[in-house]
Image (spheres, rainbow, N blue to C red):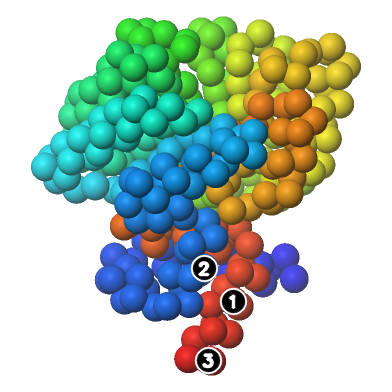
Amino acid sequence: MAATTHLSRSALMFLSRREGLKDMATRLGPLRELAGRFIAGERLEEAVDAVKALNAQGLLASFDHLNEAVRTEAETREEVREYRRLLARIDAVGVKANVSLKLTQCGLLFDPALALENARAVAAEAAARGSFVRVDMEQSAVTQATLDTVRALHAEFGEERVGAVLQSSLRRTEADARALCAERVRIRLCKGAYLEGPEVAFQDKRDVDAHFVRVMRVLLDSGVYHGIATHDERMIDATLDYAAKQRLPRGAFEFQMLYGIRRDLQVRLAKAGFPVRIYVPYGRHWYPYLMRRLAERPANLWFVLKNLVRG
């Protein structure tokens, strides 16, 4: 069963990177219907409306404009403009939200200096508006470059304006967490949605989970405001147990979850007095993001196949 699941994940992650499939896939009604569970629309205003609804339930949010592995400078500049529009809209509407940014949107894959320049422009806009930018973590090949960029932005804009993401699937993460906490960088800890080789990543879920708990304890001991990003109730219980043992107040950290996943758990934690932030993706380039969500739970693929058969 584990081998079958791994094969399904590998296939879905492979498909997520096939450029030629994107246009065809986004025209499939069942796939678009499934995407609506995990993506808050293709337009900014649709995402703003979704966040208003989340706020009404006592939930915070982090907007993510979907577009990764950008290949031209002109496209990176358009991403910067979109994030500036987004930050201005957050400010104007007054929703309780910040933004998440991928460095591959900014040009990291072909010009790291351009990526830093673009990310800095977004961070400067956020700082001017009293907001916050979370620099997302992507595949392990860009982990070090991503953390180098976060450190440069953090040095300029500070703890309240720029943060990082770490993945417990990667072997290096506990060491990275300790170093970043010493520098007072705010971290979102997640398990990681990218398939990585055994030389850089744990292959057994039990090892990923055990590492998650170790890193979570490092974060909660640091005195820095971090995000614990998981839908796994065992990881949530481990976090709550450790926070209680350390006598941390409920606002000392926040839980983070994905839009459309475990809505019941999101609301339950918020009603219990814990800050809960929902990662809200939007945009036309939703195909790779959706395929990663399917890879995390391949059973979702049956929804698509069943509806395709029905026509």
Identity of the residue drawn at 67% across and 20% down: 253
How many marks the image carries: the answer is: 3
Q: Is residue 250 above or below residue 204?
A: above
Q: Amino acid at mark 3?
A: Val
Identity of the residue drawn at 18% across and 41% down: 78
* Mark 1 and mark 2 residues within 8 Å of each other at the beta carbon: yes
Q: Is residue 34 visible?
A: yes
Q: Residues within 10 Å of mark 1 (few under 14, many from 20)?
A: some
Query: Residue 190: where, in percent of width, then height?
Result: 60, 37
Q: Is residue 141 visible?
A: no
Q: Is residue 46 above or below residue 132?
A: below
Q: Report which residue position mark 3 lands on.
A: 309
> Foreground: 52 or 128?
52
Q: Report which residue position mark 2 lands on.
A: 34
Q: Amino acid at mark 1?
A: Phe
Mark 1 residue element: helix
Q: Report which residue position mark 1 lands on.
A: 303
Q: Earlier in the sequence, mark 2 or mark 3?
A: 2
- Is 178 positioned to the left or the right of 62 in the image? right
Mark 2 residue element: helix
The quadrant in which residue 230 appears is top right
Q: Earlier in the sequence, mark 1 or mark 2?
A: 2
Q: CA distance from mark 1 to mark 2?
A: 8 Å
* Mark 2 and mark 3 residues within 8 Å of each other at the beta carbon: no
Query: Residue 99: where, in percent of width, then height?
Result: 41, 32
